[in-house]
Image (cartoon, grey):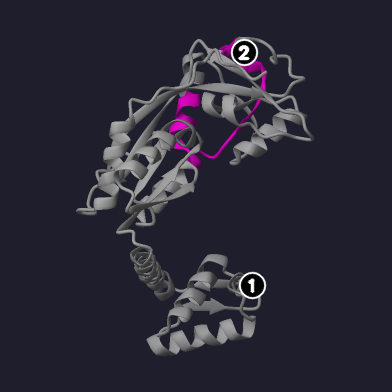
Amino acid sequence: MEFRHLEGFLAVAEELHFGRAAARLHRTQPSLSQQLQRLERTLDVQLVDRTSHEVRLTSAGRAFEVDARAIIAQAQKAADTAREAAAGRTGTVRVGYNFPAGQHILPATMAMMHTQHPQLSVRLEERRTGSQLAALAEGELDVALVYGHPVTSDFRHRRLLSLPMIAIVGQGHRWAGRPGVPFAELARQACILFSREKCPAMYDAIMTAAERASVRLSVAHVVDDPVATGILVSVKPLVGFASVSRGIFGIGTAGGVRPTWVQLYDPVPMIDLYAVWREGDGPHAPRTAFLDCLEAAGPFHAPAREARIA
C-alpha cells in the first residue's frame, strides 16, 4: 500500500468524480484510476462503485476512509514535527479562529507566546465555528476559538468574551444612519441568514432574540460567507447579521460601496466567544502553553457599541 494511493482514494472519496479528483492532485485520470485499482487489489476489497453516471463509495470504502484520513493526518503531523525540529522549534500548536478572535484575542496572546515560548510555533487557520469544531474532533486543530461551546463531554472550553450582534445594511437602506433599531422592526424586513451548522451559537442568538421580540424573520437568502452578505446588503434592500467586531473592523464591499451597521436592541442579541479543546488528548505541551498565554493575556473586552463606521 503506497501513500499516494491513499491520497488518491481520499480525493475520489471527497469529489466522487475521477476527473475532479485527478485535477486536484495534478494527476491524469487514467493514472488515478489505475492507482485506485492497485489499492483495491492490495486490500482485496472494492472501495468505489463506478458507473458511467455515478461514483460512490462502497460500505468497505466508507469504513476504509476513516482510517485512511487518520494515516494521512499522522503522516502530515510527523512531517511537521520533523520540519519544526530542523528549524529549532520544539513543537506546534494548531489554532483555529474566527474574525473577532483575530481582532481581540490573538494579538495579545500571540505576543505573549512569542515572548514566553519562542521555541514553539503557532499555526493559525481562520474558519467558521462549524468547520473549526469538525477539525478539532478530527485532530486537525488543537484549539478552536469559536462562537459558543459544544455540549459534548469530549471537549473542554473557556469563555473569553461576550459580543453584541448588529444588523448590516446598505448605505441606501432606510435604517442607514440610525443609531439603533428595535429588534421588532425586523418583522418588516427581508433578511439574510446562514446555515445553522456553520455557526450554531450565532444562529441561536438571532432566533432567541426574534422569539423574545415576537418576530418571525423573513429569510430571503441563506449565505454562509460574511463578505458575500456585506456585498448583498449593499445592492439589495436586505438586512444581514454579524458581530459588532465585523461591523467595526471588516464588512465586505461591492463596487466601492461599503455597507454600514446598526445596533439592535430590545433585545440586544449577544454571542459568547470561547476557547475549545479536546478533553481526551492527554498531555500536549504546546497547547498547554497557548492556553496559559490565552489566560494570562485576558481579560478581553468587546469594542464599544457606540463606535461607528464613518
Badge 1 amino acid: Ala
Query: Which numbered disc, 1 or 2, marks the residue that appears first in the sequence?
Result: 1
Is residue 110 among the parts visible in the rendering?
Answer: yes
Q: Which residue shows up at 28% across the image and 32% down it?
A: 296
Element type where label 1 sits in the image: helix
Residue 185's label in the rendered image is 2
Outermost residue, left side = 283
Secondary structure mostly taken by the magenta-highlighted segment of the chain = helix
Q: Is residue 234 left or right of residue 264?
A: right
Distance from Cα at disc 1 to Cα at disc 2 = 49 Å
The residue pinned by badge 1 equals: 23
Q: Quadrant of residue 140?
A: bottom left
Closer to the camera, 136 or 258? 258
Residue at point 41%, 53% (across, down): 135
| x and y, in percent, of residue 98 in the image | 48, 39
Residue 19: x percent and y percent?
Answer: 65, 74
> Amino acid under label 2?
Glu
- Can residue 154 be seen here? The reply is no
Q: Is residue 247 left or right of residue 293?
A: right
Task: State which quarter of the image contains the C terminus.
Answer: top right
What span is colored magenta in the figure? 181-207
Q: Position of residue 143 (x, y in %)?
A: 35, 46
In the rendered image, which quarter contains the N terminus? Answer: bottom left
Image mark for residue 177: none
Q: Position of residue 147 (x, y in %)?
A: 42, 34
Please state which of the two labelled residues, at mark 1 or mark 2, is closer to the viewer: 1
Crowd tier of the residue under label 2, counting other residues whose Cα lies within 10 Å: few below 14, some 14–19, many 20 or above: few
Residue 129 lies left or right of residue 119; in this view the side is right
